[in-house]
Image (cartoon, rainbow, N blue to C red):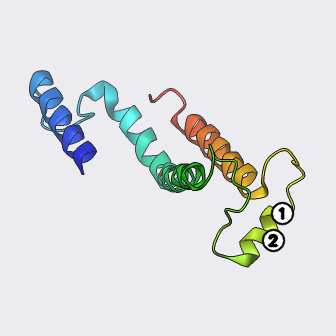
Amino acid sequence: GELRDLFQETKSLLLEVAGHDKLLTSPKSSILQERIMLRAPYMTPLNILQVIHLKNLRDYAQDGSNGRNASFKPSSDEVLKLLQLSGDLDRPPYLAAVEDAVTITMKGIASGMQNTG
């Protein structure tokens, strides 16, 4: 909630300084606005997945000594079985899968944003 409030405050101040009613209203920004709108349906799920997996990483780290607690496991046995298919023996399977998911979402978001910032 606090982050959303700060975002709204920053957005309001930016619009006031720029003299606009809303973001991306200049004629030059119409192409950028269209690109962002076209990408949004793909970017939003990636952002949500990234938040979920980052939370999982934090939860994992809090459950043991710096995230190395092999006793931590997801609530679903089926998910645990899938995670155990990982060939990385240096990391617990769940940790390896979550770290991979975070990396994949980061790459997906970076690709989707391209030069939009």
Q: Which numbered disc covers residue 70?
A: none
Callout 1 secondary element: loop
Residue 9 percent location from the top left of the image:
15, 37
Q: Nearer the viewer, residue 2 or 13?
A: 2
Residue at position x 32%, y 25% from top? Answer: 28
Kind of residue indicated by mark 2: Lys
What residue is shown with label 1? 84
Quote the CA–CA distance across marks 1 and 2. Answer: 5 Å
Residue at position x 75%, y 69% from top? Answer: 80
Q: Could you tell me which quadrant the C terminus lies in?
A: top left
Judged left or right of residue 43, residue 16 is left
Residue 70 falls in which quadrant of the image? bottom right
Residue 45 percent location from the top left of the image:
51, 56
Residue at position x 20%, y 35% from top? Answer: 11
What residue is shown with label 2? 81
The correct choice, above or below, for 70 with respect to 103 in the image is: below
Residue 8 falls in which quadrant of the image? top left
Residue 2 percent location from the top left of the image:
23, 46
Disc 2 crowd, CA 10 A, few/some/many (<14, 14-19, 20+): few
Residue at position x 49%, y 51% from top? Answer: 51
Residue 25 percent location from the top left of the image:
23, 34
Callouts 1 and 2 close, C-beta under 8 Å: yes
